[in-house]
Amino acid sequence: MEIRFGYVAIALNLNNSSTSKTITLKNLEKIAGTEPKLTKLCRITSENLENALRVIRYNMEEKIHIYRLTSKLVPFATYPLEFEWNYIDIFKNQLERIGNLIKTSSIRVSAHPDHFTVINSPDEKVFNNSVKDLEYHASIFNAMGLEKEHKLVTHLGGFYGDRNQSIARFKENFLRLPQGVKSRIVLENDDKIYTAKEVLRVCQELKIPMVFDLHHHTCNPGGQLESLIPKIWSTWTDIRPKIHVSSPKDQKNYRNHADYVEASSLLNFLSLAKKVNRDFDVMVEAKMKDIAMFNLVRDLGEYEGITQLDQSTIEI
């Protein structure tokens, strides 16, 4: 069973590699005239995209197969500016270059829209803004020429006083999403409200792949791992399943991500996944990004029965 590992957004081993540079609205409004404002946004976006290209090349060199793109490649992508901000047309060539490199290297990429993207919100304005944000992410992937196996990770959403009604509203609102967005969505269990068991039921009903977050399951348990794993895996059909792993910062801030991930916290999950014996991918969510991923793979390779195949891959 082969397991590949990846990381989120920033490659700490690369100098000045941020792909999330931006400008505040207050400072943007200080710039006089539409053209200078647009020029500023173009400069920032171009720099973000060039850094994204650098990071993908770095991933290729280091044999890293899994990577999460930042949601902040384009500043003010969904904000209603007083002028037209056609970033897809303006950066068509740069986006295609990034996409071509991703496809050439067979790197699996994803994105994770932030907590303001809430599909099950009872507020129609919040739902519409969530759709807009999801469409932004999908448009970036489309402009890169990435197929539907490159996914957008999101959660069921808020509680809103009634669990069953909120889950039902997610199902209703999910069906309202544009097809190009629906085909990229994967659902993740969260650390406070919706358990893995609850999210799995929704994924099975709507035929959505499920990302299992091991740390969230520890914070907000629901269902036994041994029975959950084969069912979660089956939601991915012909695509490799993916999970998220992280370690708590400390006992007081248990839900927050630590700098690194403790290898020992994965051993039970790996032994249970081995019974299913299907290759899968792991997104490392840690403050030390790629460095934490390298350390985790190295540490796991020291356990009996686990072989490190390259800097980001193990075999059990």
Image (cartoon, rainbow, N blue to C red):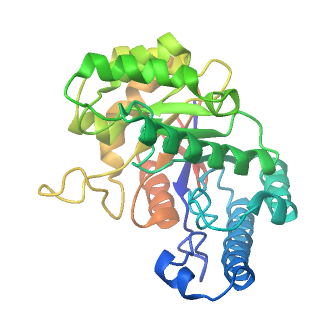
Residue 81's image quarter?
Answer: bottom right
Res. 261 visible in picture? yes
- Residue at image point 59% right, 22% down: 236
Q: Is 103 above or below relative to 241?
A: below
Q: Residue furthest top?
A: 205
On the image, the x and y values in percent for residue 112 come to 51, 47
On the image, the x and y values in percent for residue 94 come to 82, 65
Residue 59's image quarter?
Answer: bottom right
Res. 305 visible in picture? no
Q: Nearer the viewer, residue 201 or 313?
A: 201
On the image, the x and y values in percent for residue 75 come to 60, 67
Give the mark count: 0
Residue 184's image quarter?
Answer: top right
- Residue at image point 61% right, 76% down: 17
**Quadrant where the image shows the N terminus:** top right
Q: Is residue 192 left or right of residue 263?
A: left
- Residue at image point 45% right, 18% down: 171
Q: Is 152 above or below relative to 54?
A: above
- Residue at image point 56% right, 29% down: 241
Q: Nearer the viewer, residue 196 or 229?
A: 196
On the image, the x and y values in percent for residue 200 come to 41, 19
Q: Is 203 above or below relative to 212?
A: above
Q: Nearer the viewer, residue 228 or 165?
A: 165
